[in-house]
Amino acid sequence: MLTFTIRRLILSIPTLLFISLVIFLLLQLAPGDPMAQVPLTVPPEVKERMREALGLGQPLHIQYWKWIVQFFWIEPQVLMDHWFGTTFAEGKQRVISWQTRSPVMDIVVQRIPQTLWVVGLSYVVGILIALPIGIYSAYKQYSVFDQSGTFITMIGFSIPPFFTGPLLIVIFSVQLGWLPSIYDTTHVVTDWASFKVQFMQMVMPVMVLALQTTAQISRYMRSSMLDNLGQDYVRTARAKGLREGVVVMQHVLRNSMIPVITVIALGVPSIFGGAIITENVFKVNGIGQLLLTALFANDIPMVMTLTFIFAILIVFFNLIADVLYGVLDPRIRYD
Amino acid sequence: MEIEAIAALQDKEPPKEPHSQWKDVWDQFRQHKGALFGGGFLIFITLAVILGPYIWQIDPQKLDIRNKDLRPIYVALWDGTARVGWGNPLGTDNLGRDILANLIAGGRASMAVGWAAMVLALLIGTSIGVIAGYFKKADFWLMRFTDLVLSLPILPLLLVAVTLFREPLRANFGPEGGMFILIVGVVGLTSWMQTARIVRGDILALKEREFILAARSIGTTSGKIIRRHLLPNVVSPIMVSATLGLATAIITESALSFLGVGFPSDFPTWGKLLADAVQRMEQYPERVVLPGILISLTVLGVNYLGDGLRDALDPRIRGR
């Protein structure tokens, strides 16, 4: 298992390099001049110097290599410095945003908590709703509960978040006035009352994202339970007189969770991608919103870094899913 | 000379008419109520957006500033003071453009993008899947490539590609044509991977069967084997992933329009109509709800259709 994990880890390095190259080339091919916003009165030679200061004008492979060094070598050093108070990264060039002229990673670190709160919580809530639904609808296959569950998950699949978001805002903020329509990220939780405000503003974004998660995972849970419920070991467990609760909740559930857990791990990066839309609807200033503003402002280093962070998430969680599958299922041996 | 059949072997009833595989598929498909409804709705909405402009002849771009901000006719049921008019049964927007005409025009664009992107993704996915499954030499690299593309962050890359390549394509093909090519291209290029994987798996299994061996033994060329023997046998997984691809393409196009990187503002699509209406959804909720419902119902219909097709085309499930 360890060798497999190490092999996968090593294999993920070329994958990530390839992805970074694709993103880099895509951004390089694109038209759009970062100097477009500079006033026309600035003389051309000054513009040229500004361009050089941004690291443009050099050959492509050098630009790419510099970005790789900055991202994989200097940024981890900055992190080390931050954690241990060392001075490895002092005076070294970091990835700089063209919009704010400050290091990209500093801004990303500021934005990540908002995204993590909304996205992470919605994923947990979605899973917590999905698992019981999946278990029960498999146990009572073709019952009214199962049929309506299928219908609701179909709807959850089909209604895009950019419709559920405004719909919920119209119903709960405009018509009923129960929940705020905008997520206030500056809000600080100090006591019970402010916690309540925080809770209220998180309800809608979390539910919008959770609906998608619930729809997917309850489907997987149901079909996985159905696969296992018909197996011989279930009949054996019942025949030796175990209670129904023990049979379903221990024997069947444990075996059914194996594929579901990998699906849960695989779904984490896609929920980050989906959060771009939800963050836009509820005005959460997380990394999705950061990516959008950076795109519109032609801030190439920021876009490059953010897209690459999304790619790292995908590769990393694919790896976790593979490893988990091997750890949980004794029938699978990678070596 | 007459041969007497052994009594036990004789048929007790007259032999049934032989029926084709597709009749079996249709019989199974009919059992699935949701799929019937979904397919019906998809046909209805496709016909509506194709024929709609000939029936409802108001130009979606026509400004009628005197009749701006009309509410839909049904609002009059509970709100007697609302401004409604039979001339615009679903109301008008803030520039007086008819919403029904805009919905039809938007549906045309959304469905066209959806179908075109789906066909593009299917073509790429099927060819890569077939080549990888049939030619052993290509298999390793093509599948590694598919894995790599699968680990690309799709939505961020779509956003990047659309924002950055908007201008040159607009300059070359006009604002609408360029955007259409761009969106169809990026959605198609980023959604072929599942099809490729499924097709490759099926081809790998089919390739080892006796009829392929027989075809090869009489000297059939690879191209002919693929066209005559392999492709017809992978039609069913391709059809199922086609429905999924259509649903994803419609949603992706609407999401891009919603985020403001889609079609230009005077060119309606469902996602664009929805996005434009969000700012004033307190006063005019119907402008958000109507396109939203259309997107959702279409995607729901397509998903149900795919569900039914999967059941009907799978010979193991069929007939149970």
Image: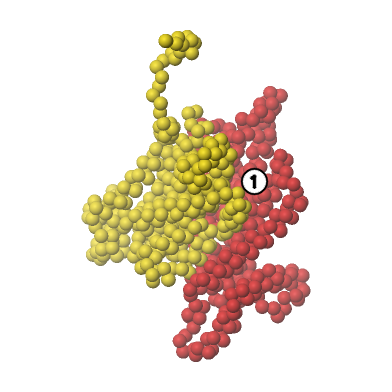
Q: Chain under label 1?
A: A
At horizontal 49% and vertical 40% (from top left) the residue drawn is B229
How many C-alpha atoms fall within 10 Å of the one at disc 1: few (<14), some, or many (≥20)? Answer: some
Q: Quadrant of residue B14?
A: top left
Comparing B53 with B214, the one in front is: B214
Q: How many marks?
A: 1
Determine if residue A331 is in view.
yes
Q: x, y (%) of residue A256?
A: 64, 38
Helix or strand or loop: what does disc 1 sit on?
Answer: helix
In the drawing, does residue A72 fall left or right of residue A308? right
Question: Relative to B157, is A322 above or below?
Answer: above
Which chain comes out red in the rendered image? A
Q: Is residue A140 above or below residue A56?
A: above
Instruction: Say which residue appears at 56% left-offset and 35% top-offset.
Output: B210
Where is mark 1, residue-wise? A261
Q: Which chain is painted in yellow?
A: B
**Residue visible at 46% across and 42% down?**
B228
Q: Position of residue A84 (x, y in %)?
A: 77, 70
Q: Nearer the viewer, residue A69 or A82?
A: A69
| Residue B250 x/y as whole percent | 43, 53
Q: Position of residue B169 (x, y in %)?
A: 41, 68
State whether residue A103 appears in this view: no
Q: Is residue A205 left or right of residue A73?
A: left
Residue ID at (25%, 55%):
B88
Question: A223 left or right of A258?
Answer: left
**Considering only vertical position in the picture, is A65 above or below B14?**
below
How was this image coloured? by chain
Identified by mark 1, the residue type is Ile
